[in-house]
Image (cartoon, rainbow, N blue to C red):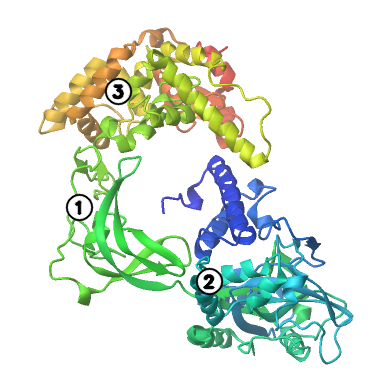
Amino acid sequence: MSEKPVESLSEGEAAEELKRLAAEIAEHDRRYHTEDAPTISDAEYDALARRNLAIEARFPDLVRADSPSRRVGAPPAEGFAKVRHAVPMLSLAKAYTDQDVADFIERGRRFFDRDKDLDIAFTAEPKIDGLSASLRYENGVFVQGATRGDGAVGEDITANLKTIADIPKKLQGSGWPEVIEIRGEVYMTYAEFEALKQRSAAVGGQDYVNPRNTAAGSLRQKDPSVTASRNLKFFAYAWGYTTADPAPTQYDSVQKFKEWGFKVSPLMVRAKSIDELIAQYHRIEEQRSSLGYDIDGVVYKVDQLELQRRWGFVTGEPRWAVAHKFPAEQAMTTVERIDIQVGRTGTLAPVARLAPVTVGGVVVENVTLHNEDYIKGFDSNGQPIRDGIDVRIGDAVVIQRAGDVIPQIVSVVIDKRPASAVPYEFPHTCPVCGSPATREINEKTGKEDSRRRCTGELICAAQAVERLRHFVSRGALDIEGLGAENIDLFFNSGLVKTAADIFTLKDRRPAVTKALAERREEQARLREEASGKTRKNVRSVEERNYEGLDKLFAAIDARREPELDRFIFALGIRHIGETTAAVLARQFSTIEELIRVGKETAKAEDPHTVFPSINGIGDTVINALRDFFGNERNDDVLDALLAQVRPKPYVMEISAGSEVSGKTVVFTGTLEKMTRSEAKAMAERLGAKVAGSVSAKTDLVVAGPGAGSKLKVASDLGIEVIDEDTWLQRIGRGG
Ligand code: IVH
């Protein structure tokens, strides 16, 4: 839930996210297909894959060569011979709701729009939760069997498949094509699974997690007699390469399979309408628990092969089929405790600790309770809130893992509420640093934020790393060579806890060297692991020469007298961005003055009696300053910091002399040397006025690449237009 919605990702973030997802999904594919030991549920996996697709849909240019959407499954494991599938083995698009199914059918209708009288028929059959296999028959004889692998290349497991009774070694009846690859699912029944577990327990053998993974492991045995002992089963439901269609329709083809000696699902039907499909879905769902094997949905396929061919494929999936998944499973458990976690921005996030319970094959022990109002079930005005629940410690709750990732509480079982259960008291202090935790009022809506936040700012350990990263970032102190990565390292190794510690790093040179060396070692080790190669000459830690370290210390020293606006911004006070920091710097001129006024304001009953009225500074900022300077615990941190750095007093000196002083400037297009807010702050520092749109009052337009309509207006009005470099030269910053 902490994930940013796809709609609000910037292009850069999207690229990063796609990279992360590609790596993460590849790893899960490997665990699932190659090791038969998945670490996340199918629903979680699907959620990752869907997020990947959604981002790719928004940023088609960012689709990676190694995108999960371009491949199916994981590469085959070592040990078995590889088999290239003559026709790739595909996966299925998924539907979670009746509406998704209706959309699928509608897509079909639209696709075949030209054929108004076309009667599209469908088949509906259970989605078996096992492993797919492809069986090649030449002249009716089973010659080769393979796993799906990555969809293109699988593993040759012919010997193991031959031990499965449901797989005919020779096709029965007649009329089979000269060559056909029969595809279907290898699975294990619950009865067989239980029997195997018992046999194994009796001899102190391994434990087996679930039938699917056990079936997978059984198929990949080196010794076919082990596979034989597992009594696996097989349903045929599709085909790959063939010299002739088995029949003109999906349904009749599968009936042919039956004649040829295969087991096919008895629950497969042909249907004409969405109502019939959904009815079959529910019929199958009803029988789910008595089937004796795992199924996880119902697969719908276009019946007419001719239409299947016309509708075709998207990457890795047929357009003409969809898997309608069963809804998330639910389970009941109790809330044992409610813990408060403090996020990096100081948000207090409540988490229910549950008595562990298995839902859809995964043990759930924690579930987010979102915020204070959610737990109460109503907001601070006493209004019931949407999706809110009154949940208390000791309550029995129904939880589910919905069609995607996160487990959630569906409802509280009020009948089971213990008499002792009292409404949960949300803490008003931060559990990490003890500072007051408050809910802000949104200035625009007048509404209270649903999140309570720690006001500990500089002193709260939970927020510490994030603040340190901010402190050294570009618009702030901008210390060269001290990026987020090094900050994380120094923080985690205890070398830097607060911003002041950065400036005393030099005194701890040996410890810094050690931390950097350890990280290098670790990185080298990881690289080695990934490549499987060992390094030739391993230099010892002492031998390493960190000439970069002197540079880093020099860069830190170079920032001991930062510009006041950068320093104020670097403090990371809420709601104080670069622009506001510049306004405050101009107003107060020295850090001492800002601190003095800030503290006075914090003490005053009505802040406006103390804090001057400044253009561009509203109550949100004033309240943030009150919180910050009113928190005595920030004093020590600030004192320690000011013992190390002396922010330069803000002097107007340049403005009078500056060429742009008094001019109205408009920035448009992409700036390459600075952010828009930096540019604005800089211009204002020089006494210019920065406007958002071009008008007759505009004196100067600074245009970067991609500048659009503003440029045209400027030229129509005969206003001077310059590029970023010229601008920088003009204000004396050009190189
Ligand atoms: S049809 C061209 N039918 O689901 C379509 N697949 O998510 C190929 N599966 O890899 C698949 N039951 O392992 C089909 N009745 C069924 C199925 C089924 C289970 C599996 C199969 C496939 C995966 C796709």
Q: Quadrant of the C terminus?
A: top right
Residue that badge 1 annotates:
426
- Rendered image quadrant of residue 214: bottom right
Q: Which of marks 2 and 3 is nearer the N terminus?
A: 2
In this rendering, the answer to whether 506 lies above or below 702 is: above
Q: Dot 1 surroundings within 10 Å: few (below 14), some, or many (20 or more)?
A: some
Comes first in the chain, label 3 or label 1? 1
Q: In which quarter of the image is the N terminus?
A: bottom left
Which residue is pictured at 22% across the width and 22% down the height?
636
From this viewpoint, is residue 133 visible? yes
In the rendered image, residue 555, in percent from the top left (x then y), is placed at 47, 14
Residue assigned mark 3: 584
Residue beneath the point at 51% across and 78% down: 194
Residue 200 - label: 2
| Nearest to N terminus: mark 1 or mark 2 | 2
The label nearer to you, 2 versus 3, is: 2
**Which residue is more in the foreground, 209 or 75?**
209
Q: Pointer 2 and pointer 3: residues touching (CB < 8 Å)?
A: no
Tell whether circle 3 marks a residue whose Cβ is less than 8 angstroms from ligand 1. Answer: no
**Vertical side of 45 occupied by 472: above or below:** above
Residue 668: % across, % down: 53, 31
Q: Is residue 667 left or right of residue 528?
A: left
* Identity, as a three-letter code, of the amino acid under mark 2: Ser
Distance between mark 1 and mark 2 Cα atoms: 49 Å
**Local SS, label 2:** helix
Q: What residue type is labelled 3?
A: Leu
**Mark 3 neighbour density, 10 Å: few (under 14) some (14–19) many (20 or more):** many
